[in-house]
Amino acid sequence: MKVKKILALALALVMCFAFAACGDSNTPSDDEGATSEQTTDSNLSFANEGTLKIGGIGPLTGDNAQYGMAVQLGAELAVAEINAAGGINGYEIEFRMEDDVSQEERAVNAYNSLKDWGMQMLMGTVTSTPCKAVSSETEVDNMFLLTPSGSSVDCIEPDTAFRVCFSDPNQGLGAADYIADNQLATKIGVIYNSSDTYSTGIKDKFVEEAAAKGLDVVAEEAFTNDSATDFNAQITNIRAAGAELIFLPIYYTPASLIMSQASAMGYTPLYFGSDGMDGILGMDNIDTALVEGVMYLTPFIESSTDEVTAGFVSAFKAAYPSQLQYMNQFAADAYDAMYIIKAAAEKAGITADMSVSDIGTAMATAMTEITVNGVTGTGITWDASGEPTKEPRVAIIRNGEVAAA
């Protein structure tokens, strides 16, 4: 097995994010990336017998359901479009999503259930900790895994595992660089989840890069999954240290509580988050005034006017008019994931009668040979580490809407 973790960490140390260049430059290629509208045609005929079964795993219930539901809808939208256009190598895609409630044991159970169903490739899992557990299972089976949003370096250690999103170290690096380069603040507090690999991975790299950039991290305050409701002690310590900005490498549920409790204390610092902040506006009864001015890393900004993003937004709105709260970065990652699978499978000449292991080996090779123009990036490529090469964006919440910073 290649030492992908080491390769990924090395990549994180040398990658430079050019935020200023990440505006509206995405353009679709002829045969890759997003299409502009969803097509549904139940009378399609496919050239070959059989189907390609692609599984998905993520939190469809629980605190992180916003992410899992977005991934499911984004994936289903792409599958409908791909099948309407003739499928992959003439095969129709069957897609099934299983709920893991963002828990390791549930994720492994979901993986086994999908194997019983006949899964040949996995688009998942959605969150990092379950993804690490499942990738160990896919390694045994040599099954191809493409996680849309599992950002922990450990998620893609197997040779047949790849990701769409940025890794945790790269998010920490990019966040520190953006804050420093744009002079948002000099004194920074950090609140992170010490029981979550996603959060700690981003935090560690952020603190390292902040020091290199001359930023003063005046306080690092931790919490765990078991103490993710009362943040008054952490906020008090950060406020006393004089932090002008709080960096939140966490998911939107605890982030919203931190902002609410800080506001109740009369403390109104700037907030900067990672991609886990995406979806906060979709929370039930969210106070938009509370999140005004919040900034976070994201590869997808709904208001972007490039053709690929505009096409995805239009198709999503047409397909899911009552579920627009799920049109976020996670939906875009999953949408791109399905088109990435299509591009790699066509490059590899995948057929429905191939074994899971043979598909995994062929897909791993093809992933290093394709370039995809998608919603979440233009000219995306992969190396054997499984890491994507693309540029991130920074979003800001203004007047209850997400805009480019």
Image (tube, rainbow, N blue to C red):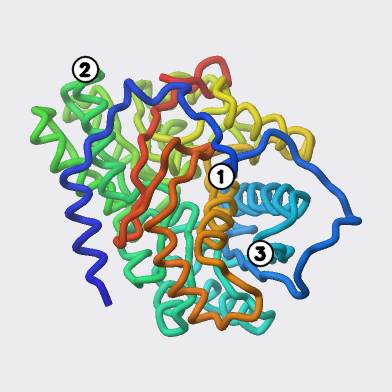
Q: Residue at x 48, y 22 (%)?
A: 24
Closest to the observer: 117 or 341? 341
Please indicate whether residue 127 sits to the left or right of residue 49 in the image: left
| Residue 81 x/y as whole percent | 72, 47
- Going by the numbered disc 3, the residue's amino acid type is Met
Instruction: Please give the residue where the numbered disc 2 appears in the rendered image.
Output: 183
Closer to viewer: mark 1 or mark 3: 1
Mark 2 falls on what kind of element? loop
| Residue that carries the numbered disc 3 in the rendered image | 97
Left or right: 309 as drawn, with respect to 396: right
CA–CA distance in space, label 1 to label 2: 38 Å
The amino acid type found where label 2 is placed reads Gln
Q: Residues within 10 Å of mark 3 (few under 14, many from 20)?
A: many
Q: Nearer the viewer, residue 362 or 222?
A: 362
Label annotation for residue 240? none
Task: Tell me which numbered mark, 1 or 2, is placed earlier along the sequence.
Answer: 1
The 10 Å Cα crowd at callout 2, few under 14, some 14 to 19, many 20 or more, is few
- Compared to residue 149, the image places residue 319 above or below, namely above
The answer to whether 170 appears left or right of 36 in the picture is left
Q: Quadrant of the N terminus?
A: bottom left
- Of labels 3 and 2, the one closer to you: 3
**Mark toward the start of the polypeptide (3 vs 2):** 3
Where residue 28 sits: x, y (%)?
Answer: 55, 34
Q: Position of residue 116 (x, y in %)?
A: 66, 84
The quadrant of the rendering that contains the C terminus is top left
Q: Please report contact status of discs 1 and 3: CB closer than 8 Å, yes or no.
A: no
Which residue position is annotated with label 1? Answer: 32
Q: Is 66 located above or below residue 293 in the figure? A: below
